[in-house]
Amino acid sequence: MTVIMSSLKNFSVNNKSRKWPKFLIGAGLLVAILFILNVFVAPIRNSFLTMSGGIQKTFWSAGESSSGFFGVIFKSGNLAQENENLKNQNQILLSQVAALQSIEQGNLAQSSVSAACQNSGFTLLMAGVTGLDKDILSISKGSADGITEGMPVINQQNVLVGKILKVYKNYSEIMLASSKNSVINVKVLQSDATLPEIDGVVKGDGGLNAHLDLVPINSKINPNDILVTSSLEKSFPKDLLLGKIIQKKSNDQQPFQQAQISLFFDVKTADNLFVITNYKR
């Protein structure tokens, strides 16, 4: 028993003596680690920040770029909206300018036709052209404005356009001189005023074309001779301009002469026309 107790005591002492070296070694290692960390923590931190700085800069630059990119997109959207607003405003201004020009053209046309017809005693009603269907022209005045069927229609140059075919409350239809149903008595004005007047008839061919017919075979007509309405014409006042001869048509088998003509009235440039409301047929 004594021997056993002695052995246990020796083992406990030996065991304690072995723990001290381990404790000292552990403490030494801890001090060494702390020293190393204290000495190298700044370089390590610096290296880490150096390496990560490029990455951070890349992401930051990407963020800035994307911010700029989306900014440009939003700015482009605003510019597009501003351009659309400017475009709309420009269209409004152009519309206003066109309206003013139309009014000015109407005033000029009114002055021009008044000067041309001031000695004829005509009462004129100005109307705007609204459409064309073959050889039928529509205007913006009707029965509410005093228009009736058969009234002559001229332009501002005192050129015969045709006559009122149908009348509605607020618009009317004009049968042009080029209509296939149109027959107008005319006289040929020759360059030599001493020569007698030459009578004839202008017949519509359709498609805005017409020709001269029923000219006596012994009469001399030439290209560029002017055609005006004659005193024989009951539907229109006399001496209204109508057209000019382009080329004679030779046919010895016919008792009358014919000629290709060019009508003075041009529907492409027609904006305002004038209805003669007081012509007595």
Image (tube, grey):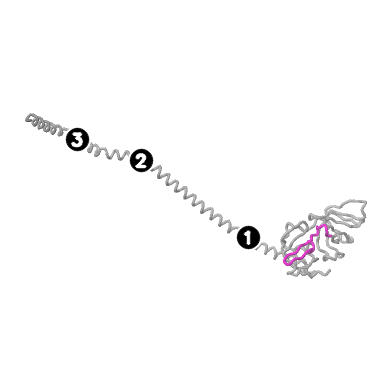
Three-letter amino acid code of the residue under disc 1: Ser
Frontmost of labels 1 and 2 is 2
Three-letter amino acid code of the residue under disc 3: Gly
Q: Is residue 148 left or right of residue 250?
A: left
Instruction: State yes or no: residue 162 in magenta.
Output: yes
Mark 1 or mark 2: which comes first in sequence?
2
Q: Is residue 12 left or right of residue 138?
A: left
Mark 1 or mark 3: which comes first in sequence?
3
Is 50 or 212 nearer to us in this picture? 50
Q: Is residue 194 left or right of residue 209?
A: right
Mark 2, residue position: 52
Three-letter amino acid code of the residue under disc 2: Ser
Image quarter where the C terminus lies is bottom right
Q: CA distance from mark 1 to mark 2?
A: 63 Å
Frontmost of labels 3 and 2 is 3
Image quarter where the N terminus lies is top left
Task: Identify the element where label 1 is drawn.
Answer: helix
- Percent from the top left, x then y, of residue 144? 73, 69
Mark 1, residue position: 95
Instruction: State yes or no: residue 244 in magenta.
Output: no
- Percent from the top left, x then y, of residue 167? 76, 65
Mark 3, residue position: 26
The part of the chain drawn in magenta is 161-182
- Percent from the top left, x then y, of residue 244? 82, 57
Is 58 or 105 nearer to us in this picture? 58
